[in-house]
Amino acid sequence: MSNSGKYILIIAEKPTAMKKIASSLAEKGSLKQKEIGDVKYFEFKRNGKKHIVVSAVGHLFNLDVKDKSKGWIYPVFEAIWRPSFLVKKSSLFSKKYFEVIKKLAKDAKEVIIATDYDVEGSVIGYNILRFLLNRKEAKRMKFSTLTKDELIQAYENLTSLNKGQIEAGLTRHYLDWLWGINLTRALTLSLKNNGKKVFSMISTGRVQGPALSLLFEREQQIKKFIPKPYWEIYAKIKIGNKVYLANFEIPKIWKEDEMKKIQKELKKVKKGIVVEIRKKKYKQKPPVPFNTTDLQTEAYSQFKFSPSQTMSIAENLYQRGYISYPRSSSQKLPPSINYKKIISSLAKIKSYSSFAKQLLAKKELKPNEGKKDDPAHPAVYATQEIPDLSKLSKRERKLYDLIARRTLAVFGDFAIRESIHVLIEVNGKKFVLVGKKTLEEGWTKIYKPYMKLDEIELPELKKGQEVKIEKIEIVRKETQPPARYSQGSIIKELEKRNLGTKATRAEILRTLYDRGYISGKSIVVSKIGEAVVKILKKFSPLVLSEKLTRKFEEEMELVFNGKKSKEEVIEEAKKVLKEILEEFKKNEIKIGKELSESIIKVRESSKILGKCPKCGGDLIILRSKKTKKFFVGCSNYPKCNAAYPLPQNARIEPTGKVCEFCGTPIIRVYRKGKRPFQMCLDPNCPSKKDWN
């Protein structure tokens, strides 16, 4: 293709980014919005040269089976990139953007890729370049925020395409496609071909399998856990008009006879003596800047946002220029982002003003940084572009406030705290009173909404002072099983084990929810999720291997750094996958039989929603022959005529709970694209009087 065109073409990843780029780079009075059909693009001049900015809508190309004539079989190893609208029905909307870029590319003399500067953004831009524009080379804009200053700087310092990013991204796409399509087909076909007439789409993937296995292992630990009893001993000590709780010197007593011996020795004591007072001042460092995982974990902890919700909200804030790129492994903020400018801008927001001004008065602005780094982007921070908070949604305001306060807090002074330990002797036994207080707030002043500092005031006491013992309290407790993972803690665990990436972990978790393999905020593995893990452990343990998944993550890092070729890694993956699929083929009937039996059990048990409040029978999901609608009826029909309507076009699950108002079982309702909700079965229940 000839490159003697009329203008410079800039390719953005999304329409909002396109608009930001155009308005930031345009010379005064030169910006024009144009349309082809209902797809907008921008034309402007810079340095006297005509530019056109056009937008993709994420990926315009997806991997697909090269030869579809063979039907739905496995293994399939040959893939081809096709326009997304030809691969997935959900991507039909992308066709018009595809056509507009293709049309505008014809007269482009130069191309600049301005997609997100990461692995995914590089693949999006590179595929457009080679398949739509039929070119091999382009310039690259590298930016971490969609602010005017940074976009101008990125334009004036154009780089070449990052080959490592592109090759690593293409490798990841191929590996995920190979694993996903082959394992999903193998599982689903084993179910279909076993003769039991049970059909369900059963999927797993390269990271999805090990992630589900990790959750399953925790589930097994909880089920197998045997609690052990122990005792804690406290002394209620009255000083002045207040009663304080002092802990026994041994935190847990494991033997009952030992507990009884101590109980006997302390039975009639009425006083104690202060034998030691230890005061210690210590510094509490500011937090480190957010990387993606830290942001997801904190947003879940503070607001119960799922990791995918956090990324969606953060992406919206980034696209409008209010925060930096939200997919970063870094916990560092380089001086090049201009600390002073950012803090000066944040000072314009009333709730941050006084703290920001204190920071600006410091001789030096130096952030407290973490160890983790990312060659592509700094940590996530609030930029100098300040939003109109009234125009943000409630969730956007919450996440922006968290990021803005964290951005300021990392520059704050240490908090100075004091701990006080008072040792009290009671009949030869020692108890400890613990006090804590803040002497200087430092960075905690701005981050206070998102942290809890224990403030335990103790009265002034002196060594040798006598104190009154009101009561010795002995509490029997039991050891607890490991806590279930939350959406925040599992993301952290996946990062720790190097499973998935900062950009994919939230999506993997969402897929496990969507497939019905897991449920709840405190994550429970469903019966079907358990069945998939057990069957894979038995017949194809490599699919669940963390070691194998981690190995390929490391291989992709080598591709990124130019130490290994994409082709080498893909061939290696095919070899491993071939071995896995051969085992599948050998055991297809057994796998199908066990899967179908599990699914039948799950379906039967999920039909029982609870006990009938009228007769005590089972309330079961049924389908009307007349209306074809699902409803709930009693297993004791016709003796009992209890019946309740159900939401249609939804997945219904029992919760094991009963409504306190009407006594009917509470169910959980799942609808595609909507948040699950709970409701009782009785439509006339008083709890529903405010429902529309």
Image (cartoon, helix red, strand yellow):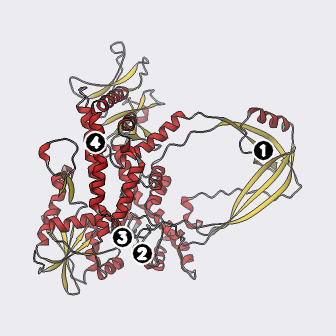
Task: For marks 1 and 4, give the CA distance.
Answer: 66 Å
Question: Reading the chain from its start, which is encountered first: label 1 or label 2?
Answer: 1
Q: Quadrant of residue 567?
A: bottom left
* Element under disc 4: helix
Task: For marks 1 and 2, give the CA distance.
Answer: 53 Å
In this rendering, the answer to whether 563 lies above or below 92 is below
Picture disc at residue 236: 1
Residue 67 placement, left or right of 337: left
Location of the N terminus (image quadrant): bottom left
Q: Residue at x 29, y 50 (%)?
A: 575
Tell me the amino acid under the disc marked 1.
Answer: Lys
* Element under disc 1: strand
Name the front one of labels 4 and 2.
Answer: 4
Q: Residue at x 19, y 72 (%)?
A: 136
Tell me the amino acid under the disc marked 4.
Answer: Leu
Q: Which residue is mark 3?
A: 321
Toward the viewer: 310 or 178?
Answer: 178
Picture disc at residue 307: none
Name the front one of labels 1 and 4.
Answer: 4
- Category of crowding for the residue at label 4, using alpha-carbon neighbours closer than 10 angstroms: few (below 14), some (14–19), many (at least 20): some
- Category of crowding for the residue at label 3, using alpha-carbon neighbours closer than 10 angstroms: few (below 14), some (14–19), many (at least 20): many
- Position in image of residue 670 (x %, y %): 34, 39
Question: Reading the chain from its start, which is encountered first: label 4 or label 3?
Answer: 3
Q: Which residue is mark 4?
A: 581
